[in-house]
Structure formats: structure tokens, C-alpha cells
Image: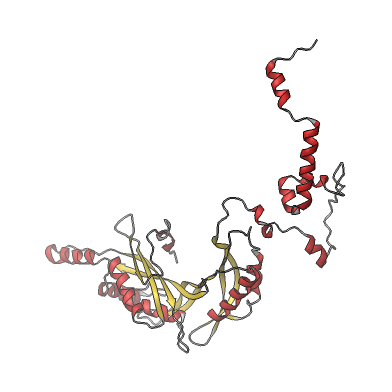
Amino acid sequence: MNKFTPEIDQKAAELPDRDEAKRALALLRQWAAAADPVEVAQLDPSIARLLPGGEVSNYPALSRDYPADFVPDADYRASMPDLQNGPASLIQGAKRHIQHVGISNFRLPLRYHTRDDGDLTLETSVTGTVSLEAGKKGINMSRIMRSFYAHAEKTFSFEVIEHALDDYKADLQSLDARIEMRFSYPARVQSLRSGLSGYQYYDIALELVEHHGQRRKFMHLDYVYSSTCPCSLELSEHARQARGQLATPHSQRSVARISVEKIHQPGNTLWFEDLIDMCRVAVPTETQVMVKREDEQAFAELNAANPIFVEDAARLFCEQLQQDPRIGDFRVVASHQESLHSHDAVSILTEGRTFEAQSLDPKLFSTLFHVG
């Protein structure tokens, strides 16, 4: 005789019987027949066997040979599952609006026009994002790249960027959109006294943003310069005069990231070179490319004539930017990468509401490190 403990009897009583399982199966089939195939597969691929025509006991034999000659037609492409464009029921997590979703560091060669009426083809890193409504699962990322390639043979300007943004904004049915293009821009720079010249490379980014139907254009530039500490310069001179002691002031490679909003003025373009020139006027101690002894001596004299603290640098850049009617709101981020200290001296100055921020990217200043 078999004997069951009350505990085992209780567990057996909790198990569904055949009638309950039959009702559950009918409910599952009813749901699966009306559900999107992607939803069915996400829950459990084996559910497909429960649908009409799906009563198979085993998966079909699958080929392991790559079909190099297979060409999908329109009907086949239409039948392919598209998880990112699936129904809202597939959304994971909070059903919230996403401000930016897209691609970053998509690279391709693009042609740019220069102030002297020339053209340069430069490797460009593209970031393209759109907003995503709360009820949409996702976007098709490749459409951003395809939209860009449709304009890749044109000489790029903000007008061309606007066409690219129009294309992928329409393709992705988005309200807001953003394109940023980063590249290293070469400009020939004369040495201070020897007559030599060499190429200085400037990290530049163009940014087009559409938000709530308004489009705004921004330009970003990293300007690398030498900063001689005014305090160290005075102390060095004091040591020479008071004690006849040779001393040298400390100076260091420094970086300013200038971000400006471009104000549209017909026939009055804000060129890359214009923004570089403003920086050179504000802080003339730009690092040098080609240097002979007379250039090195000239650079020492130029630094002595323009000693600056990091606060001075931010205000000097600001002074130049304020004077140009092609520039609206702007931000100056300066970093003096100290040779005296093991830390950097930094400052941020903003004009207007656009670049105001109470919180900063924790790695903002570490991105201003330039090695060449």
C-alpha cells in the first residue's frame, strides 16, 4: 500500500488538472493567433507550433550552406521580422520619451569648403540622433547612415546638413533630431620669425539641432595654446632682482573648447578660420608647428608678453566672441594643464541660456587633453 503524507497530498492538489490545462492551452492559442509574430517568438518560439499550420513535432531540417546566390525580393523583405519597429507591447522598461537615440562615431570622408575658396576632404565622425516617442519600441539605425550617404558627395555646409537631417527625420518619423560632425581641420601656420610654416590641426565640430520645430546651428573648436603663469613670472623676476638668482616661470600646454551658436547672416559666413583667428587675437600664444632657434626665442618672448591665469583666458576669449554679430550664445571651457601642480586649473564661462548647466559631465575636462 502506498502512503502519502499530508504535505505531498497538498502539493498534488495544487497541480492543475487536465481540464485546466486544456483551458489554458485554448487561451494561449487565442492570444498567439492575434499577436504579432515577434511577440510570440519573444515569449517562447515553441508557441508557434500551437498555431494553425504549426502542428509539427520537430523543427525542419536546416541547411548549413551559405546561399551566396539568394536574392531577396520585395515580398520576402516585407515578411522579415523587424523587432525595433514592433508594437508598444514589446517595450522593455518604462514607456518614456527618449530625447536622443541614434548612432555615434559613424565615419566617412566628406568635403568641406575653406575661406580661401578651396575644398578639403576630411575623415569625419558623425553622430546622428532623433527623439523617440514613449509608445514606440525603437528606430532603424541604418536609416541615419543611408540618409547621410545620400549627401556624401556634396561639399558640406549647414545647408547640406539640414537636407540630411530632413531625410532621416522623415524616414524615422521623429519630432526632434540632431546631427554632429567632428573632424580635424588642417591649416597652414607661419612660424614666428624663421619664415617656416607647417600644418596645425584643429578639432572642430559642426552641430545642427532641431527641437520643438526650431533649428539651431553650433560650431565647436578646440584651441591649443601655451599659458605662462603671471604669478610665477613675477616671482622669477623678483628672485633675479632681489638675489641675483636665475629662475624661470612655469608655463604649460593649455586647451580652450569654444562652442558658439551661429547666427544666420546672409552673405556673412562664419568660417572655421574666422573662429580660429578670434582665438589667436584673444590668446596669441598658440602652440607652434615648425620651430628654429629664433622661433623658440620669439615664443618665449611672446609668452612673457602675454602671461595669463585660466580666468584671464576665459575672459579674453569671451571678449572676442562678444564682438562678432555672427555669434549668439557661447561657452568657453579652458584647461591649463599645470607644470607646477599635479592637477589642472580650469574655468567655464557662458553667454546666454543655451550652454548654462548646473551639473557637468564628470569627464569634461579630461577630454581637453591634447597630445598633438
- In the rendered image, residue 49, in percent from the top left (x then y), is placed at 83, 45
Percent from the top left, x then y, of residue 304?
A: 26, 72
- Above or below, 66 against 16 in this view is below
Q: Is residue 151 left or right of residue 67?
A: left
x and y, in percent, of residue 36 in the image: 74, 54
Residue 60 vertical placement versus 183 (above, below): above
Which quadrant would residue 223 be assigned to in this image? bottom left
On the question of residue 55 being in view, the answer is yes
What's the residue at 56%, 77% (across, down)? 162
* Number of numbered markers: 0
- The one nearer the camera, 182 or 48, is 48
Residue located at (66% from left, 53% from top): 89
Viewer-nearest residue: 229 or 104 = 104
Residue 348 screen position, x and y as percent? 34, 65
Residue in the foreground of this view, choosing between 207 and 314: 207
Q: Quadrant of the N terminus?
A: top right
Q: Residue at x 55, y 59 (%)?
A: 97
User: Is residue 196 visible in this depiction of the protein?
Assistant: no
Please identify the residue farthest to the bottom as the structure is shown: 267
